[in-house]
Structure formats: structure tokens, C-alpha cells
Image (cartoon, rainbow, N blue to C red):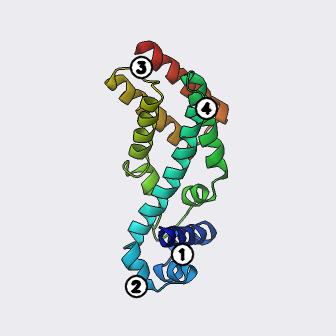
Amino acid sequence: MLLHDRLLDAARDITTAEGWSALTMGAVASRAGISRQHLYNEIGTKDELGNALINRETDEFLAVTCEQLRAHPTDPVAGVGAAVQHALDHGAHNVLLKAVLHAGDPRGESLLPLLTARPEAVLTRAKQALAAEMLALQLDRDLSTAALDVFVDGLARLVLSHLTQPTGPAELAITQAQWLTRAAMSEG
């Protein structure tokens, strides 16, 4: 796993400094101190490297976001508010997210579709993590399975929307998320 992380660190560094389109497998291998063939054996193609990079970033993001839910085990509204605040703060300072969102590549190479057009990369992972956390904390006790699915889908989409296309202050997203939480808990 150490080599895998080193490769993803190298890819992240190159992407944040020069953009995804500037990243070559040779540059990643060189930065990581291995041969290009070793990189292909470990990761696969450039697309697979992009998926792995976005997956790792998403998992780190979700782990810390779920910690915020855990910090409020008896108050889902406060927990969701804290989690959304963290997610938006983290996103505002995340250099990889900024590089992905602001990449203007004339060749069309971008990681942006992983955030916006391929739900399994981020949206599905976020929904699964949020649902699992709600179940673990028993915050779903007043929700049917269908209501929980609708709630986590709406919450994940709201946060992703505010991360990728912010149109107002973070407080707006927090208020929206808390409203959604209150509505879900009262409908349960």
C-alpha cells in the first residue's frame, strides 16, 4: 500500500501543479522513483490512476466528514450541519479539487467527469458512507429505508453541488442541509 500511496501522491502533486492533462505516466513513475512499467503493473492506465486518485481523495474527505456526524451522536441536525461545514471548508482549501474544477484543457483531458458525470466515483461513495454512518449512529431510527435513501441522496447531491458550483456562502448550504435533515426526521 505504501507504493500505491506514493504513486497517488505523485499524481496529485503533478495534477495540482500542472493539471491532469500535463500528467504522464512517465512523470508519475519518475517522481515516485520506479519504472513506468512498474507503475502500469501497480495502477494500470492513466484513467485508472485518475479513478484511484479521486477515490482516495473522496474516501479521505468522507472519513473526516463522518467524524463530524459522530461528534453529534444524539443531534442529527447539528451533526449534519457540522459535516456540511467541514466538507465545504475542506473543499474550499483542497488544491486537488480546485485543480479539477478549474482545469481548462483544450485537449479535453480532465478529472471533472469523475465528479460530475460518473456517479460511482463520488456520489455513490458519498451516499453509501452517509447511509452507513447514519445506521451506525442509529440516526435512522425514525426513518424507513426508502426515506433514508432519499435523505442521503439529497444531502450528498446538495453538498456536491455546493462544492462544484458554489453560488452563495457556506451558511446557505448548511441551512439547506439542516432543513433537509429536519424534514427527513419529521417524515420518518
For marks 4 and 1, give the one nearer the viewer: 4
Residues under numbered marks 1 and 3 in contact, where contact means CB atoms less than 8 Å apart: no
**Marker disc for residue 141:** 3
| Sequence order check, earlier mark of 2 and 4 | 2
**Marker disc for residue 22:** 1
Q: As rendered, which of 21 and 80 lies closer to the eye?
A: 80
What SS does tag 4 mark? loop
The type of residue carrying mark 1 is Ala
Crowd around label 1: few <14 · some 14–19 · many ≥20 (10 Å) = few
| Sequence order check, earlier mark of 1 and 3 | 1
The type of residue carrying mark 2 is Gln
What SS does tag 2 mark? helix
Relative to 141, 19 lies left or right: right
**Marker disc for residue 71:** 4
| Sequence order check, earlier mark of 4 and 1 | 1
| Sequence order check, earlier mark of 3 and 2 | 2
Q: As rendered, which of 38 and 119 lies closer to the eye?
A: 38
The type of residue carrying mark 4 is Ala
Q: Position of residue 64 (x, y in %)?
A: 58, 44
Which residue is labeled 2 in the image?
37
The type of residue carrying mark 3 is Arg
- Mark 1–mark 2 Cα distance, whole angstroms, equals 19 Å
Q: As rendered, which of 169 and 57 lies closer to the eye?
A: 57
Q: Position of residue 82 (x, y in %)?
A: 62, 32
Q: Position of residue 132 (x, y in %)?
A: 42, 36
Residue at the location (41% across, 19% down)?
A: 141
Residues under numbered marks 1 and 2 in contact, where contact means CB atoms less than 8 Å apart: no
For marks 3 and 2, give the one nearer the viewer: 3
